[in-house]
Image (spheres, helix red, strand yellow):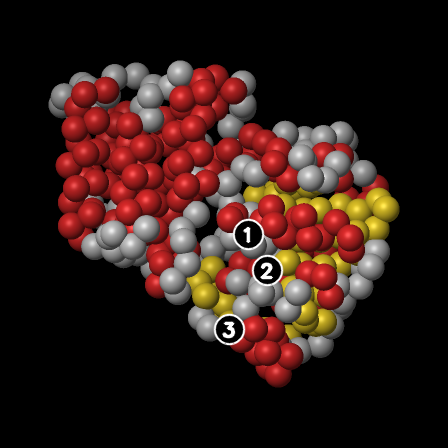
Amino acid sequence: MKLAVIGAGSIGSIIIANMARAGKIVHVVDKVPETIQSIKENGLSISGARGEFTVKENLIPFSNIEDLPKDIDVVFLITKIDNALDAVNRLKATLSEDFTLVNFTNGMIEEKIAEILPPENILGCVISFNAIWRGYGKSERTNEGEIVLGRLKGKKRQFDKEIHQSISNTAKTSWSDDITSNKFSKLLINITTASTGAFSGLAIGELLKRKPVRIAFLVNLTEGVKIAHKMGLNLPKLNNISFESLALLKKQRKILPFSLWLKMLIIKIIGKQNKKLRSANLGFYERGLPTEIPYMNGHIVELGKKYGIQTPLNEFITNLVQKIDDGNNKPSLENLKLFEEKTMEIFNQYYC
């Protein structure tokens, strides 16, 4: 199996390093020259939840997709969402006749990739472990997490077992016959945790200590769950989180009912378990890059319009972060206070 990975950021580096450590030859492409130079000189250094190690063997780095050898059998696409489609277009000339592209990106862009490549050659992937970028060629893993794979179209192939095996030493890996539902579950996590960290500048633990933010978590994912129902999706658990049970699908009494108290407690526990986790989108801002929020909360807003579901809180987040991406705002506690005020306004209007 001739293997290539596009993107050696925080998540990509962990997957690449684990495959290379297990003896796989990995062709690595990253458009950041400093990353490629660091891999050539120092390999990849991983720290965090599974210990520390450095891998220097089995890595073949490239700065350009066009420099990859021909007849690549499997490509792992682990770029930012806004770079993904350009990468797919440039990959076409390097792929073998019966290739598989595994899309690791956040969001749900598999259907757009399927406009470029045959859908039966595409695997969707959900990653639920988190990582922090610690410098070129360096990544810190912050939790155990899991990986879920599934074909966008058609049934599991014999070749998929080899792909499964190649990443199974990175995290617990399972197969799904409905990867679209799994991707949507991951999107629900992204629209809650990734967005608040991006506009506030705070880690998840600090955010979820605040009651209005915990309420926002529930309201945000409720907007998404309502859309999933319209789409006919059966949302699976991710990291043992049941999104159906957390959604506010019935109006809450003014006095805090037990069911709402329990949901809030679960969110508080999630905050404690991930207290040091910082949004990758905040990291993008700090490195002068646009966030992925338009493809996360923005996507929920688009789907809401399509299916006739109101998404006022996701719309507020999308507009707020867009100002940051445009250079007209920056992460701050003032943004967080505005967000909390909007959250309580929406909660009292629609859920009480």
Secondary structure under tag 3 reads loop
Instruction: Tell me residue 252's x, y (percent).
Output: 22, 20
Asked if 53 appears above or below 175 in the picture, the reply is below
Instruction: Return the disc, 1 or 3, that comes first in the chain's sequence.
Output: 1
Asked if marks 2 and 1 touch (Cβ < 8 Å), the reply is yes
Instruction: Return the disc, 3 or 2, that comes first in the chain's sequence.
Output: 2
Amino acid type assigned to the residue bearing label 1 in the image: Asn
Quadrant in the picture for residue 154? top right
Asked if 10 appears above or below 315 in the picture, the reply is below
Q: Which residue lies furthest to the right in this view?
A: 97
Residue at the spot 59% in from the left edge and 31% down from the top edge: 180
Amino acid type assigned to the residue bearing label 3 in the image: Tyr
Horizontal arrangement in the rendering, residue 206 relative to residue 107 (left or right): left
Residue at the spot 36% in from the left edge and 58% down from the top edge: 285
Residue occupied by mark 3: 136
- For the C terminus, the quadrant is top left
Q: Can residue 76 be seen in this view?
A: yes
Horizontal arrangement in the rendering, residue 155 relative to residue 249 (left or right): right
Asked if 130 appears above or below 101 in the picture, the reply is below
Horizontal arrangement in the rendering, residue 109 relative to residue 207 (left or right): right
Quadrant in the picture for residue 217? top left
Task: Find the distance from the CA under tag 2 to the CA under tag 1.
Answer: 10 Å
Q: Give the numbered dot on residue 83.
A: 1
Q: Alpha-carbon neighbours of circle 3 within 10 Å: few (<14), some, or many (≥20)?
A: many
Q: Give the numbered dot on residue 7.
A: 2
Asked if 228 appears above or below 159 in the picture, the reply is above
Instruction: Tell me residue 347's x, y (percent).
Output: 21, 26
Task: Find the distance from the CA under tag 1 to the CA under tag 3.
Answer: 19 Å
